[in-house]
Image (tube, helix red, strand yellow):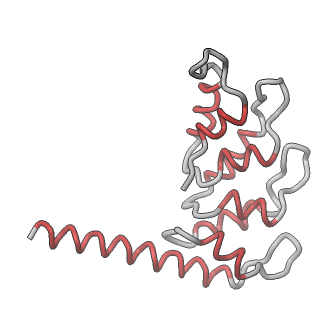
Amino acid sequence: MKRFLLGLISLASMSSFASGSVECFNQAKETKDSYGTNIKTNQAIKLCSGSESFSPIECFNEAKGKTKDSYGTYINTNQAIKLCSGSESLSPIECFNEAKKIKDFSGSYLNTNQAIYLCSGSESLSPIECLNDAKKTKDFSGSYLNTNQAIELCAQRL
């Protein structure tokens, strides 16, 4: 009986996951890119893959044309897709906006791609907290982690 119930729970979870991705994809058909044209099929698949709802679309719509990169220009369609892919909230945008304020180990601010990689799929500001801690962390040879190592350590990959 226990095994049967676990199977039903697992099936229900997969059903929610599958229908969420499809729901997101169907919503994406009407989603415009940064230039006002519909996003492409492959972009919608990348954005919605693994989602449980149409939240990645909401994140994408909020990010494109509204979120500025480290240089003050708006992030483009592909950057917004990378940032919001599979997200279940607007947290990746909040994380990205905070990441732009962080200086790397050389004293420069994180670049746009670093901030997107760090925050893509995040559901909180924990990647930021992690990165701040990682700045004080030494590797196995006693040297401090470099910026890309720290970002890789703290990024929440889906």
Residue 103 is situated, as x and y percent measured from the top left of the image, at: 78, 29
Give left or right: position of 78 versus 158. Answer: right
Q: Is residue 155 above or below residue 37?
A: above
Count of numbered circles in the view: 0
Question: Which residue is at a point 69% across and 57% down the rendered structure image?
Answer: 83
Q: Quadrant of the C terminus?
A: bottom right
Residue 82 is situated, as x and y percent measured from the top left of the image, at: 70, 60
The residue sitting at 82% across, 33% down in the picture is 109
Q: Residue furthest front?
A: 141
Viewer-closest of 126 and 149: 149
Residue 65, percent from left and from top: 84, 62
Relative depth, front residue between 4 and 32:
4
Which residue is found at the position 77% from the left and 24% from the top?
A: 105
User: Measuring 71% from the left and 84% from the top, which residue is drawn there?
Assistant: 30
Drawn side of residue 3 relative to residue 35, left or right: left
Res 67 → quadrant: bottom right
Q: Position of residue 139 (x, y in %)?
A: 60, 22
Query: Which quadrant: the N terminus?
Result: bottom left
